[in-house]
Amino acid sequence: MWSYIVFPQVEDLPTVKGDFYALGHIPNIMGAIDGSHVALVHPHRSEQVYRNRKSYHSMNVQMVCLADQYISHVNAMFPGSVHEAYILRNSSIPYVVPFLQEDGPDGSVVAAVEPVDSDEEEAEEEDMQNRD
């Protein structure tokens, strides 16, 4: 049987938010969003566009998942050189969640938080110190 990726409907939000609350005791969460680079074989056209900040070729794929790890949204349209903030602004999420810029129903908000890799953070700090 086929399964489809579907963003939760308004009537599903109490259940979705309840599931997230049960996980982390943070109220009004409707989804967890993140981007990930999916490696590609060296492209023959527009090679530089697909080279990401870690110097390998990729697609920058954005996903939203629910508390039960069910994927509710995927955007795989952008090459690796494109920043995640640009992908979010230009994705269909603002159309699926029309209240992205303001409070949603029952005070819900959509927010993206990018985790910081401690090794990457240390390397950036060292790079900044070496520039002085």
Image (cartoon, helix red, strand yellow):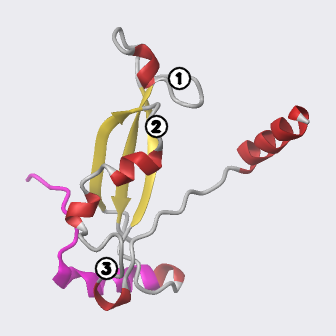
- Residue under the point 23% across and 70% down: 98
Query: Does residue 81 show up magenta in the picture?
Result: no
Note whether 8 is above or below 80 in the view shown.
Answer: below
Q: Earlier in the sequence, mark 3 or mark 2?
A: 3
Name the residue furthest front. 132
Question: In the displayed structure, does residue 25 sit left or right of residue 107?
Answer: right
Query: How many labels sit on residues?
Result: 3
Q: Which residue is mark 3?
A: 16
Q: Which residues are magenta?
A: 1-21
What is the x, y in percent for residue 60? 41, 38
- Residue under the point 22% across and 71% down: 8
- Quadrant of the rendered structure where residue 34 is? bottom left
Q: Earlier in the sequence, mark 1 or mark 2?
A: 2
Query: In this rendering, which labeled residue sits more in front, label 3 or label 1?
Result: 1
Question: In whole angstroms, how far apart are the C-alphas of marks 3 and 1?
Answer: 36 Å
Note whether 31 is above or below 125 in the view shown.
Answer: below
Q: Which residue is mark 2?
A: 37
Q: Nearer the viewer, residue 44 or 85?
A: 85
Q: Which residue is mark 1?
A: 56
Callout 3: SS: helix
The reply to whether callout 1 and callout 2 are in contact (CB within 8 Å) is: yes
- Residue under the point 47% across and 42% down: 83
What is the x, y in percent for residue 71? 30, 58
Question: In whole angstroms, how far apart are the C-alphas of marks 1 and 2?
Answer: 9 Å
Note whether 48 is above or below 8 in the view shown.
Answer: above
